[in-house]
Amino acid sequence: QHQEGSAELTNPIEAEMDKISFIFNNLSLMNLTAKTDDIKEVLKIDENLMHAKWLAQYLVMKRASIEPNFHALYSQFLVVLKSERLYDEVIKETYKNIGILLRADKSMANFSDRSLLKNLGHWLGLMLLARNKPILMVDLDMKHLIIEAYHGGQQEKQQELLYVVPFVAKVLESAAKSKVFKPPCPWTTGLMNILAELHAEPDLKLNLKFEIEVLCKTLNLEISELRPGNALKDYQRLGKLLDIKGFGMNTSQQLPSLQKPMMEEMKGFKQDN
Amino acid sequence: EINLMDELTLKGITQYYAFVQERQKVHCLNTLFSKLQINQSIIFCNSTQRVELLAKKITELGYSCYYIHAKMAQAHRNRVFHDFRAGLCRNLVCSDLFTRGIDIQAVNVVINFDFPKMAETYLHRIGRSGRFGHLGVAINLITYDDRFALHRIEQELGTEIRPIPRDIDKSLYVAEFHQEEENEES
């Protein structure tokens, strides 16, 4: 499912791919400039859009998503490469893969999906927030993601939160490095308040509480100083959210029992009209 | 980092051999580096001279590599190992100086550029310590003279070292494709 959309790409020939493998297997901060030139020479990404797309896909799927230890290096690689086209493709590819993972079935304990998500979250934060670029709601709405996960996943309680909270925390980590997004940036603070609200839930899994606490520490925030609202339990808003976006869920089945009466009402309302 | 487990395990490590002539070894290494997806690698040689020679040779060929061997001062060795662990460089050429297996999670490929003589040495090079036995692939370059040692070590360790296939399944050594069995929850 991860390979989606690759059919339309005209891949480089095998010899070129081998060279790219070799270069990435040997990429380090010390030889970054030389290796970057080598890549430019092999793929000619400025002239060849397909190669740029392929490289973006390779970088995101084969490297960033599984080698979090080299995120800083790969980020620096893009800086040195100075190709706006490649950067744009990388962002697109990152969102695409995050989307695929978030839409995948989250009812089971799939550790590999979870760690891929975490890695891509960290990568996204580094690509955007750390560079003072926003994460637009149309691309990724993390607030809704948390609310949706909080109410979703019936079989195993909090199953979806196990995917979403570590992911969001990894994204937000990079806000610490950003002039624009470090607290008290209202966008960041808004998300932190929701996380604080979640943190206050008495039955939240301990490892998710830790994730939130570690994030607070990274951002230099005291969790007690945050102002949790009631976004998680704002059922009116939730109803709207589920109604409009659907989130790919069958809402009446997946909502917690607490929610049922309200959903029944909504159904009635729709039928009347 | 402190590892109290005495047991080294080959669990999770897929082991292959490639039958080569001595003079083909560097070429073979190049091929591996063009086909595998390496996060970090460790390349073992049987002597300190060969470590230095190989490191020099492959650095010229554009590898990102450090080397470390038993004749270097301890402080120097620590420095190199620390920097390698920090990811300042991707590959490490070394002789036998780890006595407890390699505990660097990022290392997903280990190459025996020279095949060891003793099963114990092999286990120290390839085996991982610790609870999980991280995923990885080990590739042994085997010359004609190594053929008996290969067989013997395989027997002594009760393990299987298979001939290298054309394409190596990435799920065997690229960590995140791995479904962890351990339940990490609560």
Image (cartoon, coloured by chain):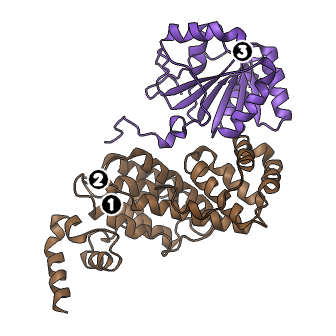
- Secondary element at image label 2: loop
Q: Drawn colour of chain B?
A: purple
Query: Label 1 to label 2, Cα distance in Å?
Result: 7 Å
Q: Is residue A23 left or right of residue A237?
A: right
Do marks 1 and 2 both belong to one polypeptide chain?
A: yes
Outermost residue, bottom direction?
Answer: A273
Q: Quadrant of the N terminus of chain B?
A: top right
Of all chains, the one bearing label 2 is A
Give the percent coordinates (x, y) of residue B133: 47, 27
- Chain A colour in the picture: brown
- Tell me what residue is drawn at x 60 percent, y 58 percent: A126
Question: Disc 1 marks which amino acid?
Answer: Leu
Q: Where B119 falls versus B57 (above or below)? A: above
Distance, label 1 to label 3, CA atoms, is 60 Å
Q: Residue at horizontal 82%, vertical 53%?
A: A37
Where does label 3 land, which residue?
B143
Numbered mark located on residue A204 in the image: 2
Residue at horizontal 78 percent and vertical 18 percent from the top: B22
Q: Where's the C terminus of chain B, which quadrant?
A: top left
* Label 1 chain ID: A
The dot on residue A198 is 1
Packing grade of label 2 (10 A; few <14, some 14-19, many >=20) is some
- Observer-nearest residue: A174 or A176? A174
